Amino acid sequence: MRVAVAQIDPKIAEKERNLDACLARLDEAVAAGAELLVLPECAIPGYMFESLEEALPYAEEIPGPATEAFEDACRRLGAHVVFGLLERDGDRLHNAAVLVGPDGLIGTYRKTHLPFLGVDRFVVPGDELPVWDTPLGRIGVEICYDLRFPEVTRTLALEGADIVCHPTNFPMAARVQTELITVARAAENRIFLLTANRCGKERWAEFCGHSQIVDPYGVRLSETGVAGEALLVADVEIEQARDKDYVVPGEYELYLFGHRRPELYGALVEETQSVTT
């Protein structure tokens, strides 16, 4: 099947403008033959809010206006989409990404690892790493900073994810993530990683772009540069993500998940104090 990633330049606090731009990208992706589109983190409201009070008016419940607009579009186009928004839960916020398909809302992921940056200073972290079965394959989601924690992608892979959608707002200071870690996460877990970063500037922050589609061998099937909006498309074969082994009978046998030694990994789940200077 064909998948797509949109690198766009949302404008902070311009929800209607941003939603229209995202819906237009979905139309373009489907016109290019894509069945799945991934859009950036906080693609609907923007990201660099300076307080909870400033951000709350641009958040919405799920389902809400943005999810309903995408449900209508996905139903019309027969497509799936992952997009980022701020979810309102009373007076609390979650940095969320929603998966929508032709049959409606499939699921919501709430960002689990929060940097002290932008609106993430004021949101509540999620506590689940769901994987959803869809007609396209098994889909998981992680948002931006989550990628820095290898346990997240590994957990999604162990739960059966074929595709990990990665909406992000990587700033220039995080460009190394787009150069090294995207490829590492895809290859070490044998999954397709679809990274949709934003570009442009928002208040004092400048974003590094370099959106990409990476295959289970760590090969970038499509990528774009730092500047400018772009739509990336690539053809993927889901079965590649389900074959975790390298076997040449009589020569070598590598079982990526079968050779794991969980009994040695206890330190990964032990609570530790933060290291500060």
Image (cartoon, helix red, strand yellow):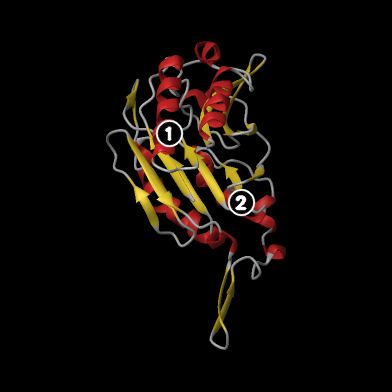
**Near-viewer residue (223 or 264):** 223
**Residue 50 in the image: above or below residue 7:** above
Residue on which the image places disc 1: 169
Q: Quadrant of residue 110?
A: top right
Q: Are the residues tagged 1 and 2 within 8 Å (C-beta)?
A: no
Q: Which residue sits furthest bottom? A: 250
Label 2 secondary element = loop
On the question of residue 2 being in view, the answer is yes
Residue 149 visible somewhere in the drawing: no
Instruction: List the single residue furthest toward the right.
Output: 263
Q: Amino acid at mark 1?
A: Asn
Q: Is residue 211 left or right of residue 155?
A: left
- Given residues 9 and 72, the one toward you in this image is 72
Which mark sits nearer the N-terminus, 1 or 2?
Answer: 2
Residue at 53% across, 86% down = 251
Could you tell me residue 253's position as x and y percent? 58, 79
Q: Residue at x 44, y 59 (%)?
A: 218
Q: Is residue 270 above or below residue 109?
A: below
Local SS, label 1? loop
Which mark, by number, is residue 35? none
Q: Residues within 10 Å of mark 1 (few under 14, many from 20)?
A: many
Q: Position of residue 21 (x, y in %)?
A: 40, 24
Residue situated in front as seen by the camera: 108 or 267 = 108
How many C-alpha atoms fall within 10 Å of the one at disc 2: few (<14), some, or many (≥20)?
many
In the image, what residue type sits under mark 2? Ala
| Depicted 139 relative to depicted 120: above or below | below
Give the mark count. 2
**Left or right of 96 in this view: 9:** left
The residue where tag 2 is placed is 161
